[in-house]
Image (cartoon, helix red, strand yellow):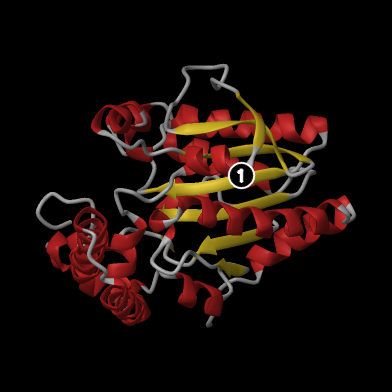
Amino acid sequence: MADGQQHLEFERPIVELEKKISDMKDFSVGGNIEFDSEIDSLQKKLKKLREEVYSGLSRWQRVQLSRHPKRPHTLDYIKLMTTDFIELHGDRSFADDRAMIGGFARIGDQPVMVVGQQKGRDTKQKLIRNFGMAHPEGYRKARRLFHMAEKFGVPIVIFIDTPGAYPGLGAEERGQAEAIAKNIQVMFQIKTPIVVVILGEGASGGALGIGIGDRVFILEYAWYSVISPEACAAILWRDAGKGPEAAEALKPTSDTLLELGVVDDIIAEPPSGAHTDPPEAARLVKEKLVTTLKELTARDTGELLKERLNKYRNMGVVRE
């Protein structure tokens, strides 16, 4: 970010032009002076500027956009695109992890089980949600909800948005790796459709621990990778500041992931990113989910499980 403002450095020219247009509109109303032609000209310039900026983003800038302070998170999407949401708590073993949320809801007329990571918006919420980094009990809570969805015969919708699973000592002592590995195993066996949407960050096993699905979609400016660019740079070059170079090497952005077959489709965002129009972003996600859930719920369960397994078996290339 720049100057403590709620925008990114490459957004500065757009923000400045938006403010100029807003000031001109206010002055026009307050001073009874017509600036219609000037405002119209500036709005056309703004539209062109947005197209130029967002069509030429580097991979690192797209990673930054996925972390935008105003970007909608899981609870925002749940509020904007579902009804009758009932949050369920706890893993029935250790604790209720607030970084992982889930519960029953409706998307349109379709009952679903929604599960996802929640980052938090302000400092207090970020601490409560542990910045979206789940502990083992978070993944065990997710697994409990997967089994509940299977029991009641409702599809599962998963929202991924995490910088990774929590790497602290307590998490490791309580079996972080085992919890994630068990989730991956169970998700291949759950006898109900699973749709995954990567909303922002999709880092490492923290994302994969709830990332197995019949369909995996990614928002246009989200990313998904085995490691964050900064962590990769810290390992390779002992310098987290080389995150931009690592982002180019990792190629974690939606366009490359679709090309490689890691995701099934890209969900478009509003022209300047989901943070500029959360209701429209939620509408686009909901539209994709409604169509996909209708398709998957009509499928034979046995065939769905076979295709789910083969989908991941066929990823990557093996050379001998």
The residue located at (66%, 42%) in the rendering is 186
Figure quadrant of residue 273:
bottom left
Q: Is residue 25 left or right of residue 143?
A: left
Q: Nearer the viewer, residue 223 or 135?
A: 223
Q: Amino acid at mark 1?
A: Met
The residue located at (30%, 80%) in the rendering is 41
> Residue 254 at x, y = what percent?
47, 70
The residue identified by callout 1 is 81
Answer whether residue 317 is visible to the viewer in this image.
no
In the rendered view, tell whether residue 163 sits above or below residue 179.
below
> Residue 78 at x, y = what percent?
56, 39
> Residue 75 at x, y = what percent?
49, 37
Q: Give the structural element (helix, strand or loop) at label 1.
A: helix
Q: Is residue 129 left or right of residue 269?
A: left
Q: Nearer the viewer, residue 37 or 45?
A: 37
In the rendered view, tell whether residue 84 sits above or below residue 263.
above
The residue located at (28%, 34%) in the rendering is 122
Quarter of the image containing the N terminus?
bottom left
Q: Nearer the viewer, residue 293 or 84?
A: 84
